[in-house]
Image (cartoon, rainbow, N blue to C red):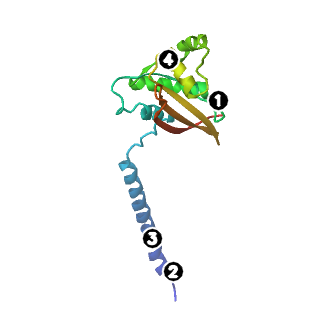
Amino acid sequence: MNRLPLLGWNLPFRILSILVFLLSVNACYFGEERESKPKKLPTPPLEQLATSLSESGFYFKPQRLVVLTFLDNEGKKSPYGEILAEKLTTELVKRERFQILDRLANQKVLKEAGLGLDAPTDTATLRKIGDVLKLDVIITGIVTPYQDGVFVNTRLIEIKSGLILKADEVYVRIDG
C-alpha cells in the first residue's frame, strides 16, 4: 500500500500543531513577564540594625548616645570594629531618633579621661564613659567572623542601670 499521500497530509498538520503549541507557550511566558512586579531590594544589614535599635516605644525623650568600637568575641578590637561602628553611627543619625555624639570628636575627651571607644564593655567602664560624655545610653557590638562575612551583635545599654534595652544581630558580607 502506498503511504506517501498519507504522510503528505499528516506532515503539514503536525508542523502546524507544533507551531500552535510553541506560540501558546510563548504567549503564556510573555504574559507572566508583563504581570510580574518589580522586586523590592533587600534592606542592607546595618540599616536593619539602625532601624531596629531606634524603634520608639520605651523612651520619652531623645537619648544621648555614642556607638563604641565593636569588639571580637574575646573582648579585643575587631578588624572590622571601627568601620562597622562608624557605618552604624551614620545609619542611626539618618533615623533622627537619638542625639548621637560623633565618635572621632569625642575620642580625645575620652583619651584624656583614660578611656577609649574600644574599651572593654564591663559596666564600670561603660558608666565612666557615660559620665564623661554625659550619655543616657551606649551601643556596643561584637563581631564574629563566619564564612564570607561577619555576624554583628549589637546592644543598646542604659548607662545608669546597665540593662540591655534592645539587642539585634545581622550578617554582613565582607567582600575580600
Q: Single out the mark in the foreground, 4 or 3.
A: 4
Q: Single out the mark in the foreground, 3 or 1.
A: 1
Sequence-first disc among 2 and 1:
2
* Residues at marks 2 and 4, CA–CA distance in whole angstroms: 101 Å
* Residues at marks 3 and 1, CA–CA distance in whole angstroms: 73 Å
- Residue most extreme to the bottom: 1
* Residues at marks 3 and 2, CA–CA distance in whole angstroms: 13 Å
Mark 3 surroundings within 10 Å by alpha-carbon count, few (fewer than 14), some (14 through 19), many (20 or more): few
Q: Position of residue 114 (x, y in %)?
A: 62, 14
Sequence-first disc among 4 and 3:
3
Sequence-first disc among 3 and 2:
2
Q: Position of residue 88 (x, y in %)?
A: 50, 27
Q: Are marks 2 and 4 in contact (CB under 8 Å)?
A: no
Q: Is residue 140 above or below residue 145?
A: above
* Image quadrant in which you'd find residue 151: top right
Q: Single out the mark in the foreground, 3 or 2.
A: 3
Tell me the element at label 2: helix
- For label 3, the residue is 12
What's under tag 3, amino acid-wise? Pro
- For label 1, the residue is 78
* Residues at marks 4 and 1, CA–CA distance in whole angstroms: 25 Å
Could you tell me which residue is drawn at 52 percent across and 89 percent down?
1
Answer yes or no: is residue 3 visible: yes
- For label 2, the residue is 4
What's under tag 1, amino acid-wise? Ser
Horizontal side of 31 relative to 164 (left or right) equals left
- For label 4, the residue is 131
